[in-house]
Amino acid sequence: MAKIALYGFGRIGRQFLKATFKNSGVLPAVIADIQSLPTLAALLSVDTNYGRWDQNVSTDGETTLNVGDKSISYINSKEGIPDWGALGIELVVECSGRATTRTGAQAHIDRGAKYVLVSAPSKSLADCDAVLLKGINLEDFDPDSQKIISMGSCTTNALAIPIKVILENFGIQYGLFSTVHSYTNTQSLTDQPMKDRRDSWAAAENIIPSSSGAAKALQFIWKDLKITGKAYRIPTRTGSIAELNLVTEKDCTPEEVKEAFRKAAQSGELKGVLDVLEDEWTSARIVGDSHSSLIDLPLTIKEGNLLSIASWYDNEWGFANRLAEVTQYLFKRVQ
């Protein structure tokens, strides 16, 4: 029987497993990482951002992870990618952060997997076969031609959803976005030289300008989309917001825009992926929320032909839930 493997058991990999349990999905048969399993199990059981998990977690040495009444094989991949073919793995969920190039993702296929779902934006449009997002274009999946699939980033998902709503209702000429994003593992807790110079300053003490791969990923979905942007990393553990500033093709009022989001959140492809906030909140409101985008309706403003909207998202939990759902969809399609 074909199986799923999870490669990389860091922040997103662990939340992915929790989301799969929550949604009663098909669990990975194998988890692979380069760290000691008992330590990873402890991090799975108690999480600084989300607290203690309601499942019992234990290990059988370094080979088996037990969660509730389920057991998952563990492989230490320090020596390289496991032989997926011998293990009967059909789909690898790639959460190591090292498969953003085609070479990195192809390595899993060379080891016997048939499909790779990358939990990150690919470096370029040539580095994956498709960017597939739930609620946007997931049904376009072609098992025959699309073997390396990118889920984009948490920001890609948070932006794609309002872009879809605005495109379908009012059209978009062009736009700019800025995302205010919690710090991540690519940064340092203390001042020290880093590859990206701005990341050389302490993540928990600075507002740090950064780049965003979301614009490239969005253009894989909408080739003619004229939107680009940047990111700012801030001293919060999780929870982010993206501001999207657009010039629309059709004239619209803020109330018409708000109503379009309310309608999209209640039914159709975006139900369960999009939500709206009618009241005034801060980032604490959306930590642990599984939606990819929560539109802050009071922050919807318009000046002349310039429309500004704000999309909140829990950059870990929201994205992990979409990753779990897309995994289940792809796995059913390739059986």
Image: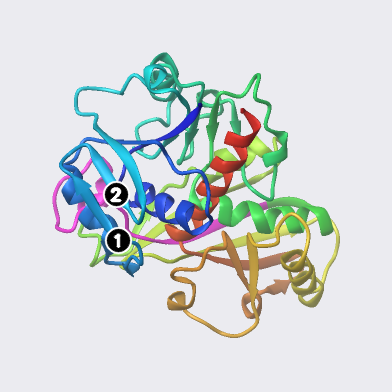
Q: Which residue is mark 2?
A: 66
Q: Residue 69 or 297: which is nearer the viewer? A: 69
Measure how far apart labels 2 and 1 are at the Cα level.
8 Å
| Marks 2 and 1 in Cβ contact (< 8 Å) | yes
Give the residue type at disc 1. Answer: Asn
| Disc 1 target residue | 56
Q: For mark 2, give the secondary structure.
A: strand
Q: Residue furthest front?
A: 69
Relative side of 204 to 126, left or right: left
In x, y percent, where is residue 54? Answer: 36, 67
Residue 123 visible from this viewpoint: no
Which of the two residues, 189 or 112, is positioned nearer the viewer here?
112
Which numbered disc covers residue 189? none
Range drawn in magenta: 175-200
Decide whether residue 186 is among the magenta residues. yes
Residue 240: give x, y in percent of width and height: 45, 64
